[in-house]
Image (cartoon, rainbow, N blue to C red):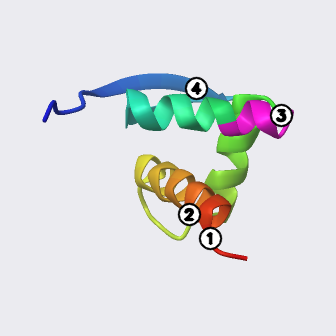
Amino acid sequence: MQSSVIKKRSIIIARHKTSISLEDEFWNALKEIASDRGMPLGKLVATIDANRNHANLSSAIRLFVLDFYRDQNAPR
């Protein structure tokens, strides 16, 4: 099994530049979710940031992506 490399990325949230460290898989999924919602990536990250229950933004993003896909695949 190949391990994912965590990459540091810069993003602007509410006019402030910040860095997040994410694996490509999470970064690509986050961009896909933002696109599906018709919103800029920075706005989605700002929303996650405002609603997070975790001290670490990168962890909050990973959990957001995980919850998003879990909700999509939940039995109805």
- Pointer 4 or 2: first along the chain: 4
Residue 1 is labelled as none
Viewer-nearest of discs 4 and 3? 3
Q: Is residue 37 left or right of residue 61?
A: right
Q: Amino acid at mark 2?
A: Arg
Could you give the CA–CA distance between mark 1 and mark 4, rounded to whole angstroms? 31 Å
Boundaries of the magenta span: 33-38
| Res 15 visible | no
Viewer-nearest of discs 4 and 2? 2
Residue on which the image places disc 4:
11
Q: Quadrant of the C terminus?
A: bottom right
Q: Quadrant of the N terminus?
A: top left
Tell me the crowding category of disc 1: few under 14, some 14 to 19, or many 20 or more residues within 10 angstroms, Cα based.
Answer: few
Q: Principal SS element in the magenta part?
A: helix
Could you give the CA–CA distance between mark 3 and mark 1, rounded to whole angstroms? 24 Å
- Pointer 4 or 3: first along the chain: 4
Q: Secondary structure at mark 2?
A: helix
Tell me the crowding category of disc 2: few under 14, some 14 to 19, or many 20 or more residues within 10 angstroms, Cα based.
Answer: few
- Residue 34 lies in magenta, yes or no? yes
Residue on which the image places disc 1:
74
Residue positioned 46% across, 66% down in the render: 54
Residue 13 horizontal/vertical position (percent): 67, 35
Viewer-nearest of discs 1 and 4? 1
Considering depth in this image, is 55 or 58 the residue closer to the camera? 58
Could you give the CA–CA distance between mark 4 and mark 2, rounded to whole angstroms? 26 Å
Residue 39 is labelled as 3
Residue on which the image places disc 2:
70
Q: Amino acid at mark 3?
A: Met
